[in-house]
Image: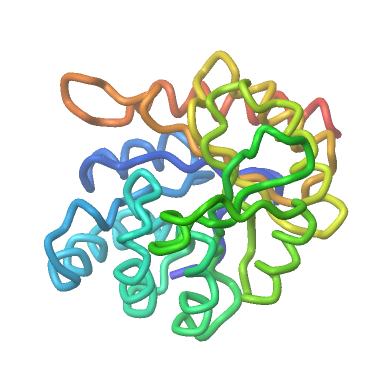
């Protein structure tokens, strides 16, 4: 199974939540494979249960597994690291301080490991205090370039910029995208992204020149009755991705 996500035009890959193996398969097909399926570690009582379940997701989607924390919960950081070591997925979500440990246990550089940073209200700066203990302390505000360089030191692949709150942090987000482009780093916007604002958020990253973009679209495309991510909406997102890729040609 491949360790590298299946990027559309070697540039963009969706990240959506999977409510079941069947839901994962349907979303994988709807995105024509250009997707990572998020499965949250927080939903399992222990490592053994999580590994057993996540292996089924890997088998059903050619390893397009994205191991998640669960709403960015820093208490899940160590469990995510342990699961990543065993499962070798294509994608791992981590708090900022968990990136080094995760990359070390993976033992390879192909799996995408993101590091969670948060907006600060100040353009060009992010909060890196997203770990189990640091998140309880005053914000750790650094320049976005410093945050990226620290993540690169730890073996990280990308910035997970959360929460976007839709377009609420647009100017800050633009600065993050520009910094990622300058430093050859990937970008993962997440939080409040929906079918309406997805195109603008993705376009900003692409126009800035970000090498690879992994937008996370979660609750806005989940059926509230079943808890499933809606494959039809996943396909709509794919069409937007295709449109932007054609515009960039």
| Left or right, residue 38 beside residue 43 | right
Q: Residue at x 17, y 25 (%)?
A: 226
For the image, the number of numbered tags is: 0
Q: Residue 79, position in %: x, y? A: 29, 69
Q: Residue at x 17, y 67 (%)?
A: 52
| Left or right, residue 186 beside residue 65 | right
Res. 113 image quadrant: bottom right
Residue at the limit of the structure toward the top, as seen here: 196
| Left or right, residue 203 beside residue 227 | right
Res. 8 image quadrant: top right
Res. 172 image quadrant: top right
Residue at the limit of the structure toward the front, as seen here: 138
Q: Quadrant of the N terminus?
A: bottom left
Q: Which sits in the foreground, 12 or 157? A: 157
> Which color scheme does this rendered protein use?
rainbow
* 87 shown above or below 36: below
* 227 shown above or below 12: above
Q: Residue 7, position in %: x, y? A: 62, 49
Q: Quadrant of the C terminus?
A: top right
Q: Residue at x 34, y 71 (%)?
A: 78
Q: Residue 154, position in %: x, y? A: 62, 76
Q: Residue 222, position in %: x, y? A: 31, 25
Q: Residue at x 14, y 68 (%)?
A: 46
């Amino acid at each position: 199974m491949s360790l590298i996500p299946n990027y559309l035009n070697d540039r963009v890959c969706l990240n959506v939540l999977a409510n079941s193996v069947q839901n994962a398969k349907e979303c994988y097909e709807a995105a024509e494979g250009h997707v990572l399926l998020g499965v949250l570690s927080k939903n399992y009582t222990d490592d053994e249960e999580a590994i057993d379940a996540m292996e089924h997701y890997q088998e059903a989607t050619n390893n397009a597994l994205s191991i998640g924390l669960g709403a960015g919960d820093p208490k899940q950081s160590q469990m995510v690291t342990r699961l990543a070591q065993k499962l070798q997925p294509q994608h791992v979500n981590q708090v900022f301080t968990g990136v080094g440990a995760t990359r070390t246990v993976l033992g390879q550089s192909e799996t995408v490991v993101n590091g969670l940073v948060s907006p600060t209200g100040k353009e060009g700066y992010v909060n890196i205090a997203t770990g189990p203990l640091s998140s309880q302390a005053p914000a750790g505000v650094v320049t976005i370039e410093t945050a990226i360089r620290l993540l690169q030191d730890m073996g990280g692949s990308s910035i997970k910029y959360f929460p976007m709150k839709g377009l609420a942090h647009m100017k800050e987000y633009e600065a993050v995208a520009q910094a990622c482009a300058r430093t050859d780093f990937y970008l993962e916007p997440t939080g409040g992204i929906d079918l309406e604002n997805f195109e603008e958020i993705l376009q900003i990253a692409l126009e800035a020149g970000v090498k690879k973009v992994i937008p996370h679209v979660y609750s806005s495309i989940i059926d509230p009755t079943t808890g499933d991510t809606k494959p039809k909406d996943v396909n709509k997102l794919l069409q937007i991705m295709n449109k932007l890729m054609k515009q960039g040609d």
